[in-house]
C-alpha cells in the first residue's frame, strides 16, 4: 500500500496544525485545510498539501476532498478539527451567530463526512476523527451554544459509528480538556462581542473573559492523542488526554444534574472570588491566574 492519506481541517493553528505535522512526520500524505493559508506555509515547507478551506462552504469542502482523491486516489483518515467557541449567555448570542457556531462545529464536519464516506466505503477502511471537547458531555454557563454544538457532534458521531462500522470505518471522538491554543482568546473575544454593555450577564462575562487560562495540555499532546486514536486497530469511541478530563466526564455522567449544577455554581463562585482578590489594588502582583474550572 502507498502511504496513507489524512485530511485535517482547522490546520492553520493549534491542534490541527500540530496534527498535520505529526501525521506527516509519521509518513502520512497530509492535506491540511483552513481559511488562512499564510500560517500554513510552514506546513507546506514540510511537504504537507495546504488548501484554503472554509468548512461552512460545501463547495470548499468538496474541492478539499476532490483534491486529495484526484492526487492520491484514497482517503484513510479524516480529522474534523476546525472549530471555535461561540461563548456568551444564551439570551445574548445573536441567532445568526448561534447558527454559525453550528455551521462550523457541526454541519461543516458532517458535510466532510458525507464527502469522504463513498471513498472509505469502497476501500472498506477509514478512520473519521471528530474533535469534540469534554464539553461534548458536560456544560457550564456562558457556553451553551458551544456545548450544544459539541453535544450534537458527539450524538452524530455515535449514530454514524453504528451506521458505518460494517463498512470497515471507525468513528472516533476526541475530547480535549483545556489546552493552550488560540481557542481561549477567540472564545473570550466572542463572549465580549456577543454581550451588550447593559446586559445582565455583562459582569459575569467580563469576569470570565479577564481570566488568564494557563493550561498544561498542549496542541502537540492532543495531536499525539489523535495519532494514537487513528492508528489503533480497535479504537475506543472516545479519547481524553488526562485522568482529570476522564474523571470529569465520568462524574458528570454518574451524578445527578442537580449535583452537577451545585458543583458548577460553587466552582464559579470560587473562581470569581479568586479573580476579584487578584484584581484588588493591594493584591500581590500576579500576572496570571491558573483556572481550569471553565469547561471547554
Ligand atoms: N483549546 C482548547 O482548550 C479546546 C478544548 C476542547 C476542544 N477544543 C476544540 O479543538 C478544536 C481545535 O481548536 P484549537 O484549540 O486548536 O483552536 P485554534 O488554535 O483556534 O484552531 C482552530 C482552527 O479552526 C480553524 N477554523 C475556524 N473556523 C473555520 C472554518 N470556518 N473553516 C475552516 N477552518 C476553520 C482555524 O483556522 P482559520 O481561522 O484559518 O480558518 C484554526 O486552524 C476545535 O474544534 C475546538 O473547539 C479546543
Image: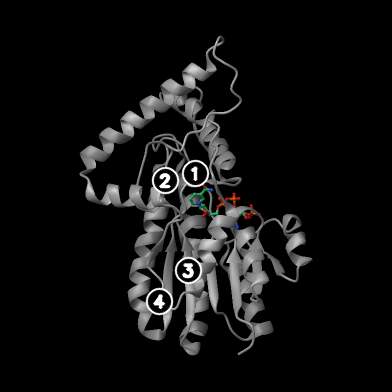
Q: Which residue is mark 1?
A: 86
Q: Residue at x 55, y 56 (%)?
A: 221
Is mark 2 in CB contact (under 8 Å) with mark 1? Answer: yes
Q: Which residue is mark 4?
A: 234
Q: Which residue is mark 3?
A: 229
Q: Indicate the secondary structure of the residue bearing disc 2.
A: helix
Q: Could you tell whether 122 is left or right of 23 in the image?
A: left
Distance CA(mark 2)–CA(mark 3): 27 Å
Which callout, 2 or 1, points at the residue further toward the start of the chain?
Answer: 1
Q: Position of residue 208 (x, y in %)?
A: 48, 30
Which callout, 2 or 3, points at the residue further toward the start of the chain?
Answer: 2
Q: Which one is in front, 25 or 66? A: 25
Crowdedness of circle 4 by 10 Å Cα count: few (<14), some, many (20+)?
few
Q: Residue at x 57, y 80 (%)?
A: 75
Position of the C terminus, as image quadrant, is top left
Distance CA(mark 3)–CA(mark 1): 27 Å
Is mark 2 in CB contact (under 8 Å) with mark 3? Answer: no
Q: Which one is in front, 8 or 232? A: 232
Q: Mark 4 or mark 2: which is in front?
A: 4
Q: Which residue is mark 2?
A: 145
Amino acid at each position: 500500500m502507498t502511504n496513507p492519506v489524512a485530511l485535517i481541517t482547522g490546520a492553520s493553528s493549534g491542534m490541527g496544525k500540530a496534527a498535520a505535522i505529526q501525521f506527516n512526520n509519521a509518513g502520512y500524505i497530509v492535506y491540511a485545510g483552513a481559511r488562512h493559508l499564510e500560517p500554513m506555509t510552514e506546513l507546506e515547507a514540510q511537504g504537507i498539501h495546504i488548501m484554503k478551506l472554509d468548512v461552512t462552504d460545501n463547495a470548499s469542502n468538496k474541492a478539499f476532498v476532490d483534491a486529495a482523491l484526484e492526487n492520491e486516489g484514497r482517503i484513510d483518515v479524516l480529522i474534523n478539527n476546525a472549530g471555535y467557541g461561540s461563548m456568551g449567555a444564551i439570551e445574548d448570542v445573536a441567532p445568526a451567530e448561534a447558527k454559525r457556531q453550528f455551521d462550523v462545529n457541526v454541519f461543516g464536519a458532517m458535510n466532510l463526512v458525507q464527502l469522504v464516506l463513498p471513498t472509505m466505503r469502497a476501500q472498506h477502511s477509514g478512520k473519521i476523527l471528530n474533535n469534540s471537547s469534554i464539553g461534548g458531555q458536560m456544560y457550564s454557563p456562558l457556553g451553551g451554544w458551544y456545548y450544544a454544538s459539541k453535544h450534537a457532534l458527539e450524538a452524530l458521531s455515535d449514530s454514524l459509528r453504528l451506521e458505518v462500522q460494517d463498512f470497515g470505518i471507525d468513528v472516533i471522538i476526541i475530547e480535549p480538556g483545556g489546552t493552550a491554543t488560540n481557542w481561549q482568546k477567540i472564545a473570550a473575544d466572542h463572549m465580549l462581542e456577543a454581550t451588550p454593555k447593559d446586559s445582565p450577564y455583562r459582569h459575569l462575562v467580563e469576569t470570565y473573559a479577564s481570566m488568564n487560562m494557563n493550561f498544561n495540555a498542549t496542541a502537540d499532546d492532543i495531536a499525539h492523542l489523535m495519532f494514537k486514536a487513528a492508528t489503533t486497530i480497535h479504537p475506543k469511541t472516545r479519547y481524553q488526554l488526562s485522568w482529570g478530563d476522564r474523571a470529569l466526564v465520568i462524574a458528570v455522567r454518574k451524578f445527578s444534574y442537580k449535583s452537577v449544577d451545585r458543583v458548577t455554581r460553587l466552582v464559579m463562585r470560587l473562581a470569581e472570588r479568586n479573580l476579584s482578590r487578584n484584581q484588588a489594588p493591594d493584591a500581590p502582583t500576579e500576572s496570571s491566574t491558573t483556572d481550569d474550572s471553565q469547561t471547554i
